[in-house]
Image (cartoon, rainbow, N blue to C red):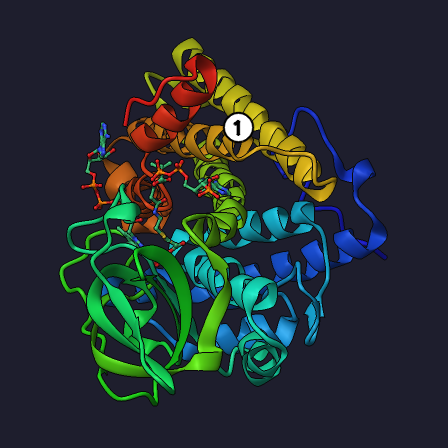
Amino acid sequence: MIDLKYLSNRYMINLIKFNKRLSSEQKMILDNTKKFCENYLKPRVINDYKNEIVDRQIFKEFGNMGILGPKIKGFSCLGESYVTYGLIAKEIESIDSGYRSMFSVQSSLVMNPIDKYANDYLKNKYLYNLASGDFIGCFGLTEPDAGSNPNDMKTVAIKEKDCYILNGSKTWISNSPIADVFIIWAKLDGKVRGFLLDRDMNGITTPKIDGKLSLRTSVTGMIFLDNVKVPLQNILNVEGLKGPFTCLNDARLGISFGAIGAAENCLMNTIDYVLNRKQFNSLLAEKQLIQYKLADMVSEYNLALHASYSVAEAMDENDFTPEMISFVKRNSCQKSLNIARTCRDILGGNGISEEYNIFRHLTNLETVNTYEGTHDIHSLILGRYITGKMAF
Ligand code: TGC
Ligand code: FAD
């Protein structure tokens, strides 16, 4: 019997339901993901966040469920659609954005470029172990002096007779301190190229970035590359910025669903709260101002979810443009941040307590709004699409 609870919540926040459009296979995957999130991630999240605990076992559990690299065909992966990928991300991020980061970096930014651009030897060597969660991967694009403009990267690769030599540094890299596999973007003869590095190679150091007040369940670090010798076969078969950006297209779609998951959790907790909290002799749920805010938030939640769903469908049909993805990444992050802020306000003092989860989602969403292209960078991508003029 298929449990459809993941789409029909206790409170009626899903105004337009799309469960009829999902296959029974998709419903089963999502139902299992929801159960895993409730039973495994939810009980640990407050402690993980408070103490910045990042547990490799979480990757293994994702692997046991079979959800890592869900778009990839073969290599023990699901071979599922973008819609399924997005809905899995939404479920995970309804618990915490950091857990979704672990899932999406591994899936979209590490397994995906290996599947798309690596040779068979590398695919066989790494994809099974990444799918099972035995290996953890990271994606090194951002540098200390090249964030929004990765084309300005300083990391270089030089070709020698029997290897490439890589030098440079990357910063703000999810998973880098615990990674076994590194997808590194570097310039070779002035052109951006991707390289697969292994923890065993000499010259790689990956210090953790301390003092993060957001995304504390996911570890972030730097990567220093000091004359790292990389075998010739470890170069990816793609040239230019379209290499990293074709991977980022998938990851940004995941974020557009994930952020809505965080907003959904804030909304559910807030509705629960106003149905129990009395002020001035009646429930907060009976106040017109509260209902007005709920109506606004539920509208934005539904609009964002359906826009993301439509873009995922377009990607499944291979009939999309990157601007569609910028539109939903930007919209979902901004609207979810606004929802989290309003929910925090509705809970009054309790809104800042860890017990209600909302403040944690709010601080996480500040990161989600920034990484994989900031809100304003996506505005400029859309502005270029609308006017044909570059304003970067
Ligand atoms: P531009 O001239 O626009 O493009 C250069 C080449 O790249 C191609 N391209 C794309 N291809 C596919 N999909 C996309 N979305 C693409 N965007 C660009 C383009 O077609 C062109 O190809 P070709 O063959 O003609 O050379 O490049 P630009 O230098 O003007 O860049 C513009 C800009 C600002 C849009 C770009 O730099 C950008 O998006 N910057 C944002 C940086 C960013 O998103 N960084 C992400 C780092 S990774 C990360 O944050 C992971 S967090 C993960 C987690 O923990 O969950
Ligand atoms: P900057 O580029 O310096 O931007 C600062 C501000 O200036 C922003 O508001 C931006 O919108 C604005 N701005 C920039 N250019 C313009 C312009 N032309 N016009 C107007 N305004 C502009 N990167 C990876 O490669 N891999 C990862 O795994 C990864 N994980 C991350 C995890 C976390 C927790 C965080 C916080 C970041 C992560 N990043 C990762 C890096 C992330 O992608 C960058 O932080 C992001 O792209 C922005 O770059 P920046 O921080 O250098 O900001």
Identified at 53% across, 28% down, the residue is 301
Q: Residues within 10 Å of mark 1 (few under 14, many from 20)?
A: many
Where is residue 241 shown, x and y percent of the image? 41, 49
**249 in relation to 328, above or below:** below
Identified at 70% across, 41% down, the residue is 318
**351 in relation to 226, above or below:** above
**242 in relation to 346, above or below:** below
Where is residue 135 shown, x and y percent of the image? 47, 80
Hey, which residue is sitting farthest top in the picture?
A: 288
**In the image shown, does 269 or 152 lie closer to the viewer?**
152
**In the image shown, does 55 or 14 lie closer to the viewer?**
55
Q: Is residue 279 visible?
A: yes
Q: Quadrant of residue 334?
A: top left
**In the image shown, does 103 or 189 lie closer to the viewer?**
189
**299 in relation to 177, above or below:** above
Left or right side of 51 for 332 = right
Left or right side of 313 for 294 = left
Left or right side of 116 for 333 = left
Q: Amino acid at mark 1?
A: Tyr
Q: Quadrant of residue 72?
A: bottom right
Identified at 51% across, 45% down, the residue is 249
* Quadrant in which the C terminus is drawn: top left
Q: Is residue 283 visible?
A: no
* Quadrant in which the N terminus is drawn: bottom right
According to the picture, the residue beneath numbered tag 1 turns out to be 301
Left or right side of 153 for 298 = right
Where is residue 341 shown, x and y percent of the image? 31, 30
